[in-house]
Amino acid sequence: ETYLNVMGYEDMKKKVHLVFASLFTDRAISYRHDRGFEHQKVQLCATCQKMVRSETGSAGVMFSLDTESGFRDVVFVTSAYGLGETVVGGTVNPDEWYVFKPTLAEGKDAILARTMGSKMVKMTYKAGGGTGLVDTSVAEQTAWSASDKDVTDLAVMAVKIEKHYGRPMDIEWARDGDDGKIYIVQARPETVASQKKVGFIEDYKMLEKGKDIVATGRAVGKRIGSGKVNLLKSIDEMSKFEKGQVLVADMTDPDWEPIMKKASAIITNRGGRTCHAAIIARELGIPAIVGCGDATEKLAAGQEVTVSCCEGDTGNIYNGLLKFERTEQDLGVLPKVGMKIMMNVGNPESAFTFGQLP
């Protein structure tokens, strides 16, 4: 567990005890059981560090590769106002940027694309300790939470961290509202996109063209799933969820993982492509559409839907069970040819995927 804005020694001591106790939460026990770790041999360290004052600045997550395709020549940056927990937890739809590494190395403007998120809330400090959510202003919602210089500086840091560890990284950052500086607060290996099998192509394609799009959001992965909607308002309704159903919720947190494992697809109102729901969906190989905004209002319990993430950055939720196909192709060892083969790509959103073809 993580505790923010801890004030005073007594409060810190209490929170350290709670961190130790979190070794035996349902989620932690389930994780160790699934991966074969012995419960009594796992150790934990409670790290106490000074807070970055990002409640008056901004914070977010960045990956040193594209999380959807595994393309390694970009840095994917997300940002929102306030503490970064809202981005990680999926409470907000953050701003997003792609930065091209080769152009960055040349010292030129390297931002390839940007998408503005709604950023409806932000997490700030409470006066007596702890944190709380407050609504953002219209001005904040319609402005970028990080400047182009911030994004470029972050991308440079991501490349350095990746080079140091020798592998793609998942990095959390924060910009202090007092001194204006950017701080890296956590870095860990990226464990999904970077582990994809090289030379193996999995492709999903819609065989029926759905005319009735019920809702849209940010696509996570390139897969398709279908089933009956199960609309859950809280984790307390876990027992109502059946294997193969489509999970629809306002947002999820790590405690939802047992349900997510049984879902054929995941749909949330809030969150970006670096939030918890998106990361777990990638790990499980389940299609997910996040940041829909109004999915819980537009979808009804028991409704049959098809969730398509194979049509670009925008994920589409179609009414009804539509036909689709999944194909696999192992390219094996391809012979060398005496020319450079180029591709004419009609959809720019597919460039990262097609660019990795041998």
Image (cartoon, rainbow, N blue to C red):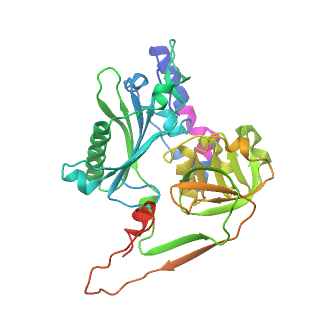
User: Which quadrant of the view contains residue 319?
Assistant: bottom right
Left or right for 290, reference 82: right
Whole-percent x and y of residue 28?
58, 43
Name the residue located 38 percent from the left edge and 69 percent from the top edge: 356
Magenta range: 20-29
Magenta residues, dominant SS class: helix
Closest to the observer, 223 or 161: 223
Name the residue located 32 percent from the left edge and 33 percent from the top edge: 183
Closest to the observer, 227 or 241: 227
Whole-percent x and y of residue 244?
73, 59
Closest to the observer, 79 or 237: 79
Name the residue located 53 percent from the left edge and 26 percent from the top edge: 17
User: Could you tell me which quadrant the C terminus lies in?
Assistant: bottom left
Asked if residue 95 can be seen in this view, the reply is yes
Whole-percent x and y of residue 115?
44, 45
Q: Is residue 320 magenta?
A: no
Whole-percent x and y of residue 285?
57, 60
